[in-house]
Amino acid sequence: MDAIVLLKDDHKTVEKLFKEFEKAGDGAHKKKRDIVDRIIEELTTHAYIEEEIFYPAAREGAPDTVDHILESVEEHHVVVWMLSELRGMDPEDERFVAKVTVLMENVRHHVEEEEEEWFPKVREAMGRNRLQELGERMEKARAEAPADPLAVSSAGK
Ligand SMILES: [Fe+2]
Ligand SMILES: [Fe+2]
């Protein structure tokens, strides 16, 4: 599996969960809690495999894009701390939906930058075989991803 195809598939999975959350009714607290639990799991795993494998490999293979990578890590930092807060938050808390809304804005912005501005440069610099090999490593690394968003390195803990 090509690394960029794999990461874009993850982005689609997360976007589907975001849409589900947006469609859930005002009183659907249990449903929203369940969706947010899945969002936390998906995004933590995704951030983990990007930070452990894809970002370092891209930094080496596409060194011109280092500024983008550094910004991406800071965006992950904000996201994983928000995920950690959402993990322990009562879905009936008046801050819950607001926090998920801001999380979604941040992630959508981040995904758009990765897909539109950065991935094409990485693809060009790294080529097919290398991306294939990275994709295989990332697929395997999913099994080692932590459940705790703050265990991802960008959390800075
Ligand atoms: Fe990312
Ligand atoms: Fe991503």
Image (cartoon, rainbow, N blue to C red):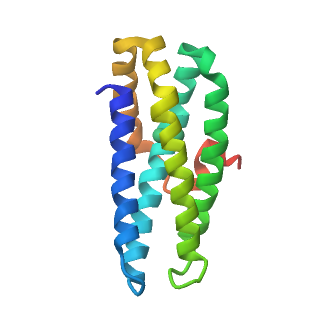
Rendering coords of residue 12 (x, y %): 34, 47
The answer to whether 136 is drawn above or below residue 37 in the figure is above
**Nearest to the observer: residue 46 or residue 104:** 104
Task: Tell which of 95 and 154 is nearer to you.
Answer: 95
Vertical position of residue 63 compared to residue 28: above or below: above
Based on the displayed image, in which of its 4 quarters is residue 2 positioned?
top left
Classify 102 as above or below 136: below
Residue 140's spot in the image, x, y percent? 36, 35
- Where is residue 10? Give x, y as percent: 37, 44
Residue depicted at 59% across the width and 83% down the height: 94
Q: State the image quarter where residue 6 is shown.
A: top left
Residue 136 left/right relative to 109: left
**Within the image, what quadrant is residue 80 found in?**
bottom right
Most extreme residue toward the right is 157
Q: Quadrant of the N terminus?
A: top left
Residue 148 seen from this side: no
Can residue 59 be seen here? The reply is yes
Between residue 108 and residue 147, name the one nearer to us: 108
Q: Is residue 140 above or below residue 100?
A: above
